[in-house]
Each structure stands twice: as structure tokens, then as C-alpha cells.
Amino acid sequence: MVSASRPRLLLRQLHRVMAGPGSGQERLDRVVQEIARNMVAEVCSVYLVRPGNRLELFSTQGLKQAAVHKTSLKVGEGLVGLIAESGVPLNLPEASAHPKYVYLPETGEEVYHSFLGVPIIRNGLVVGALIVQNETQRHYTGEEVEAVQTVAMVLAELMGSGELIDPKELSGAGKDPYEPVTLEALTLADGIAAGVAVFHEPKIDIEHLVAEDIDVEQARLADGITQLREGLDRMLVASDMPLAGEHHDILETYKMFAYDRGWQERMVEAVDSGLTAETAVERAQQDIRARMAQTRDPYLRERLSDLEDLSNRLIRIILGYSGEHAHQQLHEPSIIIARAIGVAELLDYDRKYLKGVVLEEGSPTAHVTIVARALGIPMLGRVPGLGDRLADGDRVIVDGDMSRVCIRPTDDLDRAYTESLAGRQELAAEYAAQRDLPAVTKDGVAIDLYMNAGLLIDLASLETTNAAGIGLFRTEFQFMVSSTLPRMKAQTEIYGQVLEAAGDRPVVFRTLDIGGDKRVPFLPYVEEDNPALGWRAIRLALDRPALLRYQIRALLTAAIGRVLYVMFPMVADISEFMQAREIVEAEVARMEKLGKKLPREVKIGSMLEVPALAWQLDRLLEIADFLSIGTNDLMQFFFASDRGNPKLANRYDLMSPAALSFIHSVSEKCNAAKVPVTLCGEMGSRPLEAMALIGLGLTKLSISPPSIGPVKMMLRNLDLGEFSSFLRPLLSSPEHSLRDILKAYAEERHIPI
Ligand code: PEP
Ligand code: MG
């Protein structure tokens, strides 16, 4: 067993070995021997990642020496490969019982039963694995796991010294250094960008792992934590926040973590075990990473990544990198490369040169993704092994349209992108020039182009695009970035700011669309088999009416003296709409009774996102003031095809006669009933699709702000009468999609799509 002082003892011994004479290999061998002795383990081995994603046995005590530098496994292969792939420790009393176990006869390891392996992580990347094995079947204690993890950090430092492996190889520079590579990614924030690769983390270079004086280290840690908290407090009160409300909420969440006792205690304990303050933070951070990799709960993963962001901040503070703007300065257009990045970290970079971000991880609903989108910074995620494929300074192109990242592009590719970027800039200038021109077709039909929004920062687009208003304000974003249920006052303030920014233009507030995969911190999470079909949106609102009531109260107060437009998401049955409508009316009556001021008028609408509602339109249109077609959900239910599943992305086309005639019948019914209908799904944001929708009789589209320019340009060049006559008969055609036909139509007539 490892006593409390044992890890400390081991660290001291390792420190001595590392400072002592000998080649890198000799010192690694000695380190391995010390670990085996200290841990009373028969085997201790180190595997390091080599080119080709192989893990090579670099040193061992206990296995056959002849296997050293001969035996290797692929990342993902065997137990060692699993550790390297997952970045998570593995603690097994009987290694051979694990499904991933691979028997390597040349090592002679068959006699060993218990197995403890931890990843060796450097700059956030797994660069190897440290393995301890025993003949007896035993479960290693938590303390032992921690001791081995700490040692793995020392080994990471040894590797960084360049004596074992060319350090370029570690940063990936040694791997196909000149080859152009294109990697697939998940688009988190749209757009195209080009620049040089800047690794997000290399600044954190921890040199001193072992504490000379534990009291001094405790004081450094405590001082660092205090500075971290003060810094966040300062950011919270700073008045020139670029992100007003949401930024504030995100920082509040950070602050909650910064004051988290458990986190602090982990770090204090790590210093007690003999580490320096900065290493203690990193140790705690590695635990967070391991927990992140294990948890299936997406919400928790994202909160843990906030905590990791804070850890990086704290390390920089302890190491004396100055204050909030601790990052390396950018000097030219740059693409930030990281495993993950936090909001505060992203905002630290100079916006002038920050052109794009590529992450090994990343999630569509993470705080940082929401912020990148709002700031218009193209961001790609889910590129495993990214850090291995490029080096600092490599040219990188981020292509959010094609969901790919091009590393060291060929001259031809680079030129094509540069031209495309220049073309985009030119187009942007053209869109800006038509800002004040009316959105009217060539034959004089006026189309209302509204924009979709959800964050305060989106509001600036009202001015730049000159949108007719906000056709969909997704209120859940505020709730998703806040750690506690936003209070009524805070809600009222946000809605008030939205209305104020909109001035005379209408704003349609959609009540909370939470639940399912849109997790919020203040509601218990119940795992559902089909979250998109689950307890979400209006279903949740009607089961928990207090939430809706408070939101309505806030909206009514914010819209005093104005017209308030409210609509409900995911209505599947007309009775749901009626109940929700009654809640709004009851709130209006309550405020009247209390003698409070009210909006000039309250208009209540429904979203059409569930096909069943389309068969209740006759009745619905009698009681709803307006309708909004949410094609994102409507079409996934129409085709029974998950909107987030890339395997299905190209299977069905929204430009199919089936989908278009469905939308056509809805629009016809609304027009006949004289109930205003808007389409607010992403579909309307693409000019070709928008052309088809207008051809079907829709005259109101609510689309993403950057799409307003292209859609307006399209419709100003469209003869709607002629096009409608062309389109309508096609709705009964047996084609899988009308896309090509409509594209050819537009191209022949020089309609920009
Ligand atoms: C939709 O479903 O089309 C919609 C606009 O709502 P969301 O994308 O927020 O689900
Ligand atoms: Mg929806």
C-alpha cells in the first residue's frame, strides 16, 4: 500500500533521477525502476506515441527487455491503446478479462493479473501511457492511481525535454510536416477563415513539478485562487462587456466554480502530496478531464469544461503571466487550435487577428460555441488527433460550409479559398449596399425578411441587415447559459433590451423551448430514449406552468405600451395551444387586476413543428393570431429523420415535392384564413430554398442575419409570378427533389442563389 508520504517520496526520487546524469533513455529506465520499487509492482512500463499513431514500448521493468522499442500497439488497440485513445486511467484486477485485452507474447506479460494504466498527457494531448502490473489480482487504491497519475506528469516533462523523442514529433511537426491534410469536422459556427495555426495551450509550460517547500506552494496556490476570483469579479462588474447579458451569466457560472470548495480541496491535497502549486492545479485538471471523458451527461461535460477553462487561467496566474490578457498576442490572421477552449479564453484573444477556431472536442451547445457563433468566428469541432496533424505556424483553412479543416493547403487550394474569401467580402459589400433597398420581387411583391435571434449580441444585426424585425427570438438561450433559473427581473430586463433595440419593428418571442436535448441546469435531467420527441417545449411548460407564467409576466412587463408577440414551441395538439393561451390570458387579467400597465396588444401564435398540427389547422387558425413554420423540427418529424444525424443529412431533401407541397398546403390555408404565417426554420436562410418558399406563396421569412443579404438579392431578381407558375405544377412530380430543376431555372435567369 502507498502511505500518504509515499507519493512524496517517489516524487523526490524521480526529481533526483531527472536532475541527475545519463541519457534520456537511461533516466527513463531509472524512473521506471523507481516507480516499480515504490509501488511494489512487478511490472512498470512506459509506452510513448510515435508516428503513425503507434504506442511503442519505451521502457520496462518486469517485462522482457527484448520487447523494448520492438513491441507496439495502435492507439485504440489493447488496454494501452484504449488508455491513449480515451485519455482515462484504467484500473483492472484481472486485465485479461477486459474485452480490449490483447495478448502480446513477446513481452511475457501473461503471468500478471492486475493492471493499472494512466495516460501521459502533455499540452492537453495524450503522448503515452504509464502502466503498472502485479501478479496478484488486486484493485489499486485511489491513492495509488493518483500517485501513478502524478508520476505520469513527471514523465510528460521528461518527454518535453527532447531527450527521448524529438520535441517536434510531440507537437506533431514531425509527422508528415509538408503534406497537405484535409480533416472532416463538425461545424459549430459557420463561415470560412484562413490563417496560421496558433496552439492554444503551449504557454502553460510547467517546469517545476516537485515542491521545494510545501508551505510556500500552498501560499502560491491560495494567492493564485484569490487573484483568479478577483479577476472574475472585476470582469463581472466591467461595464464594457461585449456580450452584456449572456457574458455576464457565463462569468457568473465561472465564479460559482471559482468558489467551489471541492475543487480547491483537491488542489490543496495535491500540494500536500508534494507538488508545486501549478502542478497541483494541473493534477486536478486531469481529474476533470478524466471525469469529462467518462460522463455521458452532455450538460455536465460542458460545465466541467468551464472548470477546465478556469484551471488554465489559474495556472497562468500562478506562473505570473499577467492578468486577464495572459495569452500570447496574435500578430497575423490566426486560427486557434485547441483540444477545448473556454469562453473567457476565447475572449482573451485579439479579435483583430482571431479568424477561426478548430477544436479536437467541442459541442454545438457549449457556451463557447454560442459565443463564437454570436461573434461570427467560424469554429469547427470534433477533430480527434488534430494536434498531431499540424504544428504552430502551419497555414490552416477553416471551412464551416463544407465542415472541414485544410492544413497546409496546396497552393491551388489556398488560392481558391483566398479568392472565395475575397469574393465573399465583395458580396458582403454588395449586400451592405442593398441594405436600404426594399425586399420586393421584380414584379413588385413585397416580402418581409425578419431575422432569428437568441442572444443580445444578435441585436446589432438588426441595424446592419435592416431586417423587418425579429421573427423568432429563442428565449431559451438565456436559460441555457445561466446556472440558475433567471429571475423575473433579469428576464424582464433582457426582453426589454431586445424590444428597445428593435424599436418599431416587431419581435416574436418564442417561449422556452427547453428539455429534450436543450438542457438547462435548474431542471432535473431525465434520460430519454428519444429526447427530440420527449418532454420538452410546451409539454414541459404545461406540466410546470410556473416557469411559463413567470416568463409571460416578464414579457408582459417588458412590452408595456407595445405590441407583444408570443408563440409556443412544439405544439402537437390544439388543446396544448389553448391551455398555453389561457395561461397568457390569465396573466394579462392578473396584471389588469393589480392595476399594472400592459402591452398595447398581445398577439398569441403557434409554431408549426409537429406534422399532426397541420391536420388541425382549420380550428387552430380560428384561435391563433399567427403561425410560424419551424422547418428544422417539422421536417425531421415529417421524414422521421434526425436533424442532427450526419448519416441522414443527404437522404431526404427539403426541396422534394412532398415537403414543398406540405408547406404549400399550410401556407394556402393560412392565406385563406388571413392569418399571418412566417417560416422561421433554417430552410428559409438559403436563397434557393427561399425562392421555392416564396414561390409557394409565403411572404414572410425569418432567417439568420447573414442570410438576409443573399435572400434579398435573390428575390429582387425574381419574377415571382412567372416562377410560381413554373413551380406549382412540379409539386406533383415524382422527382426525389426539385433542387436541380429550380437551380437551373435560377441560373438561366441570372437569379443569384
Ligand atoms: C425549428 O424547429 O424550425 C425552429 C425554428 O426551432 P429550433 O431550431 O429552435 O428548434
Ligand atoms: Mg424547433
Image (cartoon, rainbow, N blue to C red):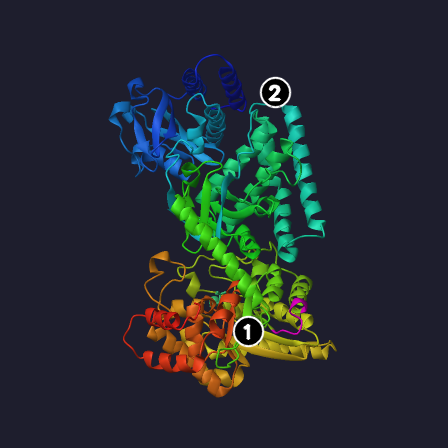
Q: Which residues are magenta?
A: 500-506
Is residue 75 toward the left or the right of residue 201 in the image? Answer: left
> Where is mark 2, residue-wise?
212
Q: Position of residue 93 (x, y in %)?
A: 36, 32
Pointer 2 local density, CA inside 10 Å: few below 14, some 14–19, many at least 20: few
Q: Looking at the picture, which amino acid does disc 1 mark? A: Met
| Residue at x 50%, y 52% (from the top left corner) | 378
Pointer 1 local density, CA inside 10 Å: few below 14, some 14–19, many at least 20: many
| Closer-to-camera residue (99/191) | 191
Q: Quadrant of residue 260?
A: top right
Above or below residue 700? Residue 451 is: above
Q: Quadrant of residue 468?
A: bottom right
Element on which disc 1 rests: strand
| Closer-to-camera residue (226/266) | 226
Most distant residue in the right direction? 595
Element on which disc 2 rests: loop
Q: Position of residue 518 (x, y in %)?
A: 50, 59
Separation of residues labelled 1 and 2 (CA atoms): 63 Å
Q: Which mark is residue 567?
A: 1
Q: Which mark is residue 103?
A: none
Is residue 274 toward the left or the right of residue 134 in the image? Answer: right
Asked whether residue 481 is drawn in magenta, I would say: no
Q: Quadrant of residue 265?
A: top right
Q: Position of residue 301 (x, y in %)?
A: 49, 48
- Residue 64 appearing in the image: yes
Is residue 214 toward the left or the right of residue 339 in the image? Answer: right
Above or below residue 61? Residue 529 is: below
Q: Looking at the picture, which amino acid does disc 2 mark? A: Glu
- Residue 360 appearing in the image: no
For marks 1 and 2, the one nearer the N-term is 2
